[in-house]
Amino acid sequence: MQAGTPLSYQLEVDDGTICFKNQNTTIGYCRYASNGDIEYIYVQPMYRLMGFGKALVDQARIQTGQKGHPQEPISPMGKRFFAALEQRPS
């Protein structure tokens, strides 16, 4: 695995979808609604805790201009992730 920050990887933004990719695979992706709500977010396990999830959520907020919320159902890991995002300064 190549070490790095989310900024060192290819970012693809489509209408409602954001993906981080490298030359071999998709690292993480996020689906979001027009109101900024996060419909689905996933980061490959070997890339977790490196800032990719936060970068995906931040990019959804940039694209929509709104601070959305996660949509139900939320997994236990997702609940911890979004709780940690709320505690961090923007």
Image (cartoon, rainbow, N blue to C red):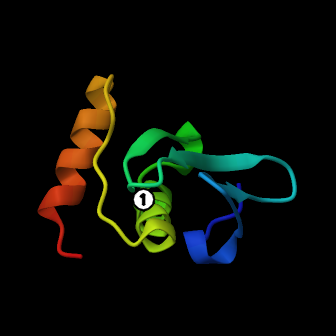
Q: Is residue 45 left or right of residue 83?
A: right
The quarter of the rendered structure image containing the C terminus is bottom left
How many marks overall?
1
Q: Which residue is at the far front?
A: 34
Neighbor class of circle 1 (other Cα within 10 Å; few <14, some 14-19, many 20+) is many
Q: Which quadrant of the view contains residue 18?
A: bottom right
Q: Which residue is at the far right?
A: 23
Q: Is residue 21 left or right of residue 84?
A: right
Residue 74 location (% of width, % of height): 31, 27
Image point (51%, 69%), residue name: 63
Q: Which residue is at the far left?
A: 87
In this view, 79 is above or below 22: above
In the depicted view, which residue is nearer to us: 26 or 1?
26
Q: Amino acid at mark 1?
A: Val
Image point (42%, 59%), residue name: 57
The residue where tag 1 is placed is: 57
Residue 38 location (% of width, % of height): 41, 45
Image point (12%, 60%), residue name: 87
In this view, 69 is above or below 5: above
Q: Is residue 36 left or right of residue 67?
A: right
Residue 49 location (% of width, % of height): 41, 53
In the depicted view, which residue is nearer to us: 1 or 67?
67
Residue 32 location (% of width, % of height): 49, 48
In the depicted view, which residue is nearer to us: 68 or 79?
68
In this view, 59 is above or below 39: below
Q: Secondary structure at mark 1?
A: helix
The quarter of the rendered structure image containing the N terminus is bottom right
